[in-house]
Image (cartoon, coloured by chain):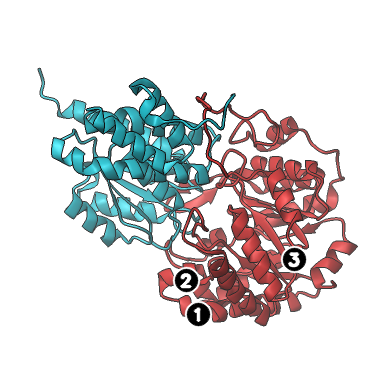
Chain colours: A red, B cyan
Amino acid sequence: MTNALSKLLDSRDWLMADGATGTNLFNMGLMSGDAPEMWNVDESAKITALYKGAADAGSDIFLTNSFGANASRLKLHGAEGRVHELNKVAAELGRDVADQSGRTIIVAGSVGPTGEIMSPMGSLTHERAVEMFHEQAEGLKAGGADVLWVETISAAEEFIAAAEAFALADMPWCGTMSFDTAGRTMMGLTSADMVKKVGKIAHQPLAFGANCGVGASDLLRTVLGFAAAGPTLPIIAKGNAGIPKYHDGHIHYDGTPELMADYAVLARDCGAKIIGGCCGTTPEHLVAMREALETRPRGDVPTLEQITTALGGFSSASDGTDGAGPEASPRRGRRRRSE
Amino acid sequence: MSDQDDDIILSELNDEDLVAQMFDDLYDGMKEEIEDGVNILLERGWPPYRILTEALVGGMTIVGHDFRDGILFVPEVLLAANAMKGGMFILKPLLAETGAPRVGKMVIGTVKGDIHDIGKNLVGMMMEGAGFEVVDLGINNSVESYLGALETEQPDILGMSALLTTTMPYMKVVIDTLIEKGMRDDYVVLVGGAPLNEEFGKAIGADAYCRDAAVAVETAKTFMARKHNQGAPAA
């Protein structure tokens, strides 16, 4: 399949993705609790500025302001009937910025989680999840997105439902999950588990990886876990710029541009090919990351110690891939749930 | 272990073995077995409150610890909580009849703009598992919604959850309103959600940040104990 992203991936050693959406929109005056996607229509100049911020800072890929633009989430704001429109506009604004940049920039249509638990644990059926993701995918496609990009997913079932929806929309895609609970996703998936699950998906993504989670160190441990599992697809690293702190009425992530520059280079050494930031990552961080990726040489794969020395400690001792995790409570072991 | 396939007849176990088996069955999310266990203990004359604390709360404490320690994850905890709910459904009316001591009451909800309720639901279930009365306001709660519930429910604890960078500052809006109205000190305010941390909790004026549902239960218990101590008449 030829599309803009696979061409770029073939021709380059590494690509830089974008940074945060929420953090940057807050800096432009978004109020807590409001849906960022409404700004695609109500404050479109600010969304264009958001995209331009990433493009001007040297991003090769940026994600559209459509993370929460699925029917389940928009319902909160009484806008479940505007899925197609809000996604289409999100992608159109991005298309304009990319086309006017004078170089190849990929517009990636962001697709976030539904926020619901899928069956059998929860009430969201596979069919309904596919339907919601498909509706969003068609909107992003109509607006001119180059690829779709599902992100911050914690359940394998939801990731798989998105892949199926993107196949229905006949769109190439990338996907990242969020590893925020003892090095795993909230649903308990390890980095190695994700490589296995991705390998079984019929409509293969162009790249896969991790975003958000808990700070830059944890994210790189996850990338090392991906690489160790022998994936065949390029790896994506989109980590947060540190940890959120509250200062004078707004959220501030404590990761400096210098730290994110170190993170970017280490991410490449860990085996990531697409490198960006997530929450807290501003254009200023991106400029520093781009410069570091361009000027610093590749190094050996870092050890966990080198990562913590450079970026700070991990949130948990193990990420579940080393067999050294905590032991379960002793049990009688006389019967187990049969599954 | 040997003989995994052996069927266990719960009613043939002595009290001690039965409770131990119920711990395992809770851990494994086996709802029907928990319901059976509760009924057997009732038949044997156990007071409902003893069944709640020794069998159900005891078992959920193990689940909570392994969740806190990254051994169990959300799917397993949801199953365990569902099994516990089966037992609670039997015990609840009996507890009301027998006038069992009340641990405390909590109003909980996800903040405005946020639909994520997985963590919040877990907290609610684990709090119920620990004997608290829980009023769940659901998702997308405005300041008005929280304040209204505080007035009608008169809880000891207010719990707020947010899973997005874009919604977590709203917790401060709620707390600031409580301060403005002179109501802040009437409640213990606990906050939680993936992007939060302890420092954030302090900065916005919450009493505590709870990393997960197990920590929420422990924290709530600590605050309730402190409150009871303060309320105790000087001897």
Is the residue at mark 2 from the same chain as the one at mark 3?
yes
- Please give the name of the residue rendered at 42% of the width and 31% of the height, measured from the top-left corner: B9
Q: Amino acid at mark 3?
A: His
The image position of residue A228, as x and y in percent, is 79, 41
The secondary structure type at the circle numbered 2 is helix
Please tell me which residue lies in front, B203 or A180. A180
> Mark 2 to mark 3: distance in Å?
27 Å
B101 with respect to A25 (left or right): left
Number of marks in picture: 3
Among the 4 quarters of the image, the one containing residue A7? bottom right
The secondary structure type at the circle numbered 3 is loop
Give the mark nearer the N terminus: 1 vs 3. 1
Mark 2, residue position: A74
Q: Which label is found at residue A302? A: none
Q: Chain of mark 2?
A: A
Among the 4 quarters of the image, the one containing residue B71? top right
Mark 3, residue position: A203
Please tell me which residue lies in front, A78 or A132. A132
Q: Chain of mark 1?
A: A
> Mark 2 to mark 1: distance in Å?
8 Å
Q: Amino acid at mark 1?
A: Arg
Among the 4 quarters of the image, the one containing residue A151? bottom right
Q: Which label is found at residue A82? A: 1
